[in-house]
Every structure is written in structure tokens, then in C-alpha cells.
Image (tube, rainbow, N blue to C red):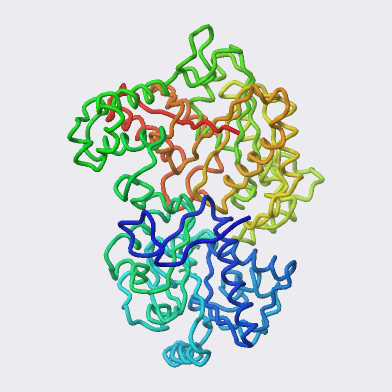
């Protein structure tokens, strides 16, 4: 693979950008290139008989960089003997052995797998006496200086804009010190700590000046939830409220972004403002949608001056504003359909789906056992009521997300109902009562999976499909009994391919969530895409269309929507009811993400918000809409 990026200074269509940044299709590719830069530097220094001083980060972002470095060590002989490392930060107080310590993180992701000399590893100690902290931090600075400073500093970015744990307000000249963590930062960490109340409120972090003194800085950002802060850091003013913006003053810093994290940059969001554009159909649609939002007008009300005054004159060279408006209006209007499986006996030239066959076999892939109803409950029900043969395949068991108290409740009901039952319930009940963490016990996880299966069946029965059309695939990559999942293998792909081959669907629906690069949705989607590649040449696949839906978090941008399925107020209530059958995922759910609303509220809000957007650009006023994008494989 040819992977490279231009060095700072070689800026292209980056008019609003004040930090060199490069965008990659996905975080995997981007991580390979960062690892390559690091390994090149290590080797260069080896040849000069010098140490290579690396500043290292923790968090979800660098995991795949470390994975690639470990691979290079194992397969390409990359040695870390000349590496001296300094980690950015550590929670305080925190013991080294704690599974949430950055010591533990670095060991499991990198240090335990490479030949670095342990005495060359430096990570702030979260276990020192409080009265020693100032002295300790000054020593940390000295140790870095003694090595001649950091050659390469790897950074992530927090949603507060922090680098290291330099939260908003951090001083430009700050050094290693004890800091207070912002609420948002602690909230983002709560999953690992099983609740925000367990996340430390303070940490030791390198300062802005410590980081700035590095000879080379690479900051990674993956996923949609970083796009807004990335835009502020790169395009905004240098601002103490966004620590990462301080890097605008560094001569050799690069932001490496995946597509989702770059979405708010001007060159991505409205590329016509950064220079001449390559006006394909997609981009024209994006521009008109953007113009509606900018001017707060519906499509057919946009005028020639709206285009001219908003950097879109170039568009008017080929077509009049009137035709542009009309093209986009028709495109959006035609995406709306009450017939997601195609309207039988009708002219389907401009409809999103084919009319034939009028009764289709439909396969909905749902990463967790409730994504089907959360993300496309309304469309699911329409497909069933319009006579299609709808199957659902739950890709993972979702067993990690059932709380101990829920498993306990079911076991206690069984014990009270069948007191003579010869099962090992008493032992399990004891374990469940004595732990607040996720329990890696195969029986308990199995019971948790069964609870979720039964919830799913209650929902699919409510929607009206027979139980034999509901498939629980339990993909092995997920079945680790812990939050950390395995890397998927061909076994996972085989299960997906066999399911598709058995059903031979005319339509596949899948969760097209690309937001969280390490999340289960993305892994499930990658496995599906891989399997589609393999199956592509099969005759039955010629007649199969793939539609992507979005999960509870993000919506497709309006110009990317290929099919919009409206819901009546009654259908919204039915969808809500179907979601309610997933009782273990209601109220205080274990994996809430950064949004405190319950799943049904989130999805209703999202479905209503997109309906409002459709209305604002001049479509009919629907209660709610579910949206889909076609995937051409
Ligand atoms: C980690 C660190 C933090 C993270 C940032 C992003 O050592 O200092 O600044 O880089 O919070 O975290 P993730 O990568 O988990 O989104």
C-alpha cells in the first residue's frame, strides 16, 4: 500500500486551516502511516547510534498505532532497544496495577510486546505522595530535558480540546503538573470506570510547554464526536479554551484525521469556500443543502444572489440557479417513500427501490440485539406489513450490556419458582451479589445473552415476524466476556456469508455507523463489507441491494440520503413500544455513550429532527423519518 503524507508547509485546499492536517478514509489506514513515521524515526536514530525519544499517549485513539508497531516488531524486526519513552499523563491517585492506569494500558498495548528496555519507560506516577508532586513533576521535566527533549510526540485530543490532560484554561507555558479533570473528560472515561463517580478528579500531565518543545508532533483524531473540536483547534483562533489550538504555533505539527473527524473542516464541509471544486453530482447536492441551511431557506426559494453571495457562483456556469434548485428538490422529493421494499406494480424509475419482485426477502443485520428497532423500527414494521419476508440477524449477543442486577433478578425468579432446581444458581447468585464490575464468567454471560435474545424475540413478535426468521449469530469476535473485543477473523465472516447465502435476500439493511472506529457497529459493518466482496459474484447477489441505516447517534447528511421513510404519529408510538421490549437497555443502561437520553428518546428526537429538516427545505411536514443510504458493493 502506498501510504504517505506531505509534510507541514505543503498545504493544498486548506485556506482556513492553521495547522497542517491530513485526512484518511479510515483510522486504520491513518494509524499505519503514523506507525510508519515512528518506525522510520526509530531506525534512523538507530543508524546514528542515538536514542529515539518518544512522547506517548493513551486512550482509544493510539491503540491501532501501537498494534501496528507491535506487528512491525514481530514481523519486520523493528527493535525498540534505542527507544526512551515519556508518557503524557496518568490519573492521580492511581496505582500502577489498576486496570484503568495508563501504566497498565501501555503495558498491554505496547511495552509487553516489544523489546524496549524497561528502565527507558517513563510514565507519571499516580501513586506518589501529594506533597511530593511538585518536586516529582519538576524531575519529570528534567528527565525529558536530559534525553535532549522529545523527538516525536503522539497526541490524542479530548472533546474539551485537551492535549495530555491540559484542560481548557491551561497556560501556554505550563509544565508537568497536577491538574483537575473537566466533567466532560471524566464523563468520557466513565465506561471504563463503571460510572463517572469512580473516575479520578485529578491527573498528572505534561504541560503545554512540555509538549510544544517536542521536535515533531502528530495528533490523531478519529470519529464524528471529535469533528467539532478538531475544527476549532485547526481553524479557530489560538484559544486557551481549546488547548490543542496552541499547536498552531508549532512548526512541525500535523493533525492526522479520519474522514468522520474531518467533517467540520471547511474544506470538507463546504469545499467551495477553500478554492475551485470538482463539481460532481454529490458535491452539487451537498452545496445546495448547505446553502439552504446557511440562508435558512427552502430549496425552491434559493435565488441567484444566494448562490453568488455564498461562494457558489462556479455552480452557475453550467446550470441556472433555477435548474440547480429543481434538480436537488427532485432528488430529495424522490427519496421519500412509504414503500421501503418497493411499490408493487408501479413505475419505479425514480423511486428508491425496485417494484419487482413485489414480495422481497429482506435481511436486517443488527449489530446488537436492539439496533434493528432503535434504528429502523418504523421501516421494519412497514416491510412486514407490506408482505415482505423479513429476517433479522443479530450479529452479537450484546451480553456485556446486561447489568449484574438484571441477571441476578432472573436467577432469583428461577430459584424462587423452582426451589428444587438442580442448577448452579446459588453459586452464580453469590458471584453476582459480590461484584459491581462486568463478570467474566461464561455461564453468567450466557444467561445475559439469553435475556437479550428473549427481549429481541418479544420485539420481533410485536412487529410480527415468526421466530424462525430471527437469527442470533453470536459472532465470536465479541464473545470475550470483557469490554475489549477480539480482532474479527474469517470465522466471523463465514457466519455472515452463510446467513446471506441461506436467505438470499433482495434487500440487506445494515448499521452504517462509522462514528466510533473501535465500536462494535463499525466492526460488524467491516465484516459485512468483506463478506459482500466474497459473495459479489454469486448469481443471487445480482438481485440484492444494500441499505445502510444509522444507529442512535448520528444522522446521514441530508444530501447523502437515498431513501427516507416517513412515520405517522401512530407508527412512532409503535416503534417506541418495540424498543421498550428491550428492558435491560432501558433507564441507567451500562453503555450510554456521551448522551444521557434513553435510546428511544434519542432515536425519536433524531427521527423528528430529520423530518423537520425535510420540512425546512420544502418537503411535506412529517412527524418523523427514518433514513437510508444505498451501499453499492
Ligand atoms: C491520553 C491523553 C488524552 C487523550 C484524549 C483522547 O494520554 O492524554 O489527551 O489523548 O483524551 O482520548 P481518546 O483517544 O480516548 O479519544
Query: Is residue 193 among what the camera can see?
Result: no
The part of the image, by quadrant, that contains residue 118 is bottom right
- Provide residue 322's location: percent of width, then percent of height: 25, 24
The part of the image, by quadrant, that contains residue 454 is top right
Q: Residue at x 23, y 42 (%)?
A: 310
- Across the whole image, how many numbered discs are drawn on residues? 0
Q: Nearer the viewer, residue 10 or 586?
A: 10
- Looking at the image, residue 623 lies above or below residue 10: above
Q: Residue at x 33, y 82 (%)?
A: 173
- Provide residue 522's location: percent of width, then percent of height: 57, 46
Q: Residue furthest right?
A: 422
- Looking at the image, residue 411 lies above or below residue 615: below
User: Looking at the figure, which quarter contains the N terminus?
Assistant: bottom right
Q: Nearer the viewer, residue 338 or 32?
A: 32
Q: Residue at x 33, y 66 (%)?
A: 242
- Looking at the image, residue 194 lies above or below residue 300: below
- Provide residue 42's location: percent of width, then percent of height: 61, 77
Give the left or right position of residue 265, taking residue 479 as reference. Answer: left
Q: Residue at x 35, y 63 (%)?
A: 233
- Provide residue 180's location: percent of width, then percent of height: 38, 74
Amino acid at each position: 500500500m502506498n501510504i504517505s503524507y506531505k509534510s507541514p508547509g505543503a498545504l493544498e485546499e486548506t485556506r482556513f486551516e492553521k495547522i497542517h492536517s491530513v485526512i484518511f478514509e479510515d483510522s486504520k489506514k491513518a494509524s499505519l502511516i503514523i506507525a510508519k513515521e515512528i518506525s522510520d524515526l526509530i531506525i534512523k536514530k538507530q543508524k546514528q547510534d542515538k536514542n529515539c525519544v518518544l512522547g506517548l499517549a493513551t486512550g482509544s485513539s493510539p491503540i491501532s498505532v501501537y498494534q501496528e508497531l507491535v506487528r512491525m516488531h514481530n514481523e519486520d524486526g523493528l527493535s525498540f532497544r534505542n527507544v526512551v519513552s515519556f508518557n503524557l499523563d496518568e490519573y492521580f491517585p492511581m496505582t500502577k496495577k489498576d486496570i484503568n492506569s495508563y501504566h497498565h494500558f501501555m503495558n498491554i498495548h505496547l511495552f509487553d510486546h516489544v523489546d524496549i528496555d524497561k528502565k527507558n519507560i517513563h510514565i507519571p506516577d499516580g501513586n506518589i505522595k501529594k506533597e511530593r508532586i511538585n518536586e516529582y513533576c519538576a524531575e519529570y521535566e528534567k528527565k525529558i530535558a536530559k534525553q535532549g527533549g522529545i523527538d516525536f510526540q503522539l497526541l490524542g485530543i479530548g472533546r474539551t480540546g485537551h492535549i495530555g490532560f491540559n484542560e481548557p484554561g491551561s497556560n501556554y507555558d505550563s509544565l508537568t503538573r497536577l491538574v483537575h479533570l473537566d466533567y466532560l473528560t471524566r464523563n468520557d472515561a466513565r465506561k471504563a470506570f463503571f460510572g463517572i463517580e469512580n473516575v479520578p478528579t485529578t491527573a498528572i500531565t505534561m504541560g503545554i510547554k512540555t509538549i510544544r518543545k517536542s521536535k515533531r508532533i502528530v495528533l490523531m483524531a478519529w470519529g464524528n464526536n471529535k469533528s467539532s473540536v478538531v475544527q476549532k483547534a485547526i481553524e479557530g483562533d489560538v484559544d486557551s479554551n481549546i488547548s490543542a489550538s496552541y499547536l498552531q504555533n508549532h512548526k512541525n505539527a500535523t493533525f492526522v484525521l479520519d474522514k468522520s473527524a474531518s467533517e467540520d473542516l471547511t474544506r470538507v464541509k463546504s469545499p467551495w469556500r477553500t478554492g475551485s471544486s470538482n463539481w460532481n453530482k454529490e458535491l452539487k447536492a451537498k452545496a445546495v443543502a448547505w446553502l439552504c441551511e446557511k440562508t435558512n431557506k427552502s430549496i425552491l426559494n434559493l435565488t441567484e444572489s444566494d448562490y453568488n453571495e455564498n461562494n457558489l457562483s462556479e455552480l452557475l456556469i453550467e446550470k441556472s440557479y433555477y435548474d440547480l434548485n429543481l434538480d436537488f428538490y427532485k432528488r430529495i422529493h424522490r427519496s421519500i417513500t412509504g414503500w421501503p421494499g418497493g411499490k408493487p406494480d408501479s413505475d419505479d424509475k425514480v423511486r428508491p427501490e425496485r417494484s419487482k419482485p413485489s414480495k422481497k426477502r429482506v435481511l436486517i443485520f443488527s449489530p446488537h440485539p436492539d439496533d434493528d428497532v432503535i434504528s429502523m423500527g418504523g421501516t421494519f414494521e412497514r416491510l412486514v406489513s407490506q408482505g415482505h419476508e423479513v429476517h433479522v440477524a443479530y450479529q452479537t449477543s450484546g451480553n456485556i450490556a446486561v447489568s449484574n442486577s438484571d441477571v441476578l433478578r432472573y436467577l432469583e425468579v428461577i430459584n424462587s419458582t423452582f426451589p428444587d432446581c438442580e442448577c448452579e444458581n446459588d453459586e452464580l447468585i453469590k458471584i453476582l451479589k459480590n461484584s459491581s464490575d462486568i463478570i467474566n464468567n461464561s455461564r453468567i454471560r450466557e444467561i445475559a445473552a439469553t435475556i437479550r435474545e428473549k427481549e429481541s424475540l418479544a420485539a420481533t413478535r410485536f412487529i410480527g415476524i415468526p421466530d424462525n426468521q430471527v437469527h442470533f449469530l453470536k459472532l465470536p469476535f465479541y464473545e470475550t466476556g470483557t469490554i475489549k473485543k477480539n480482532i474479527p477473523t474469517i470465522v466471523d465472516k463465514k457466519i455472515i456469508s452463510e446467513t446471506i447465502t441461506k436467505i438470499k435476500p433482495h434487500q440487506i439493511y445494515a448499521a452504517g455507523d462509522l462514528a466510533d472506529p473501535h465500536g462494535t457497529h463499525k466492526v460488524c459493518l467491516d465484516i459485512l463489507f468483506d463478506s459482500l466482496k466474497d459473495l459479489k459474484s454469486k448469481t443471487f447477489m445480482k438481485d440484492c441491494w444494500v441499505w445502510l441505516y444509522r444507529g442512535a447517534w448520528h444522522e446521514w447528511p441530508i444530501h447523502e440520503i437515498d431513501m427516507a421513510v416517513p412515520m405517522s404519529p401512530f407508527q412512532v408510538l409503535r416503534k417506541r413500544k418495540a424498543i421498550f421490549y428491550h428492558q435491560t437497555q432501558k433507564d441507567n443502561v451500562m453503555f450510554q455513550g456521551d448522551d444521557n437520553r434513553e435510546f428511544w428518546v434519542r432515536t425519536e428526537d433524531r427521527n423528528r429532527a430529520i423530518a423537520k429538516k425535510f420540512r425546512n427545505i420544502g418537503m411535506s411536514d412529517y412527524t418523523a423519518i427514518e433514513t437510508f443510504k444505498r451501499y453499492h458493493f
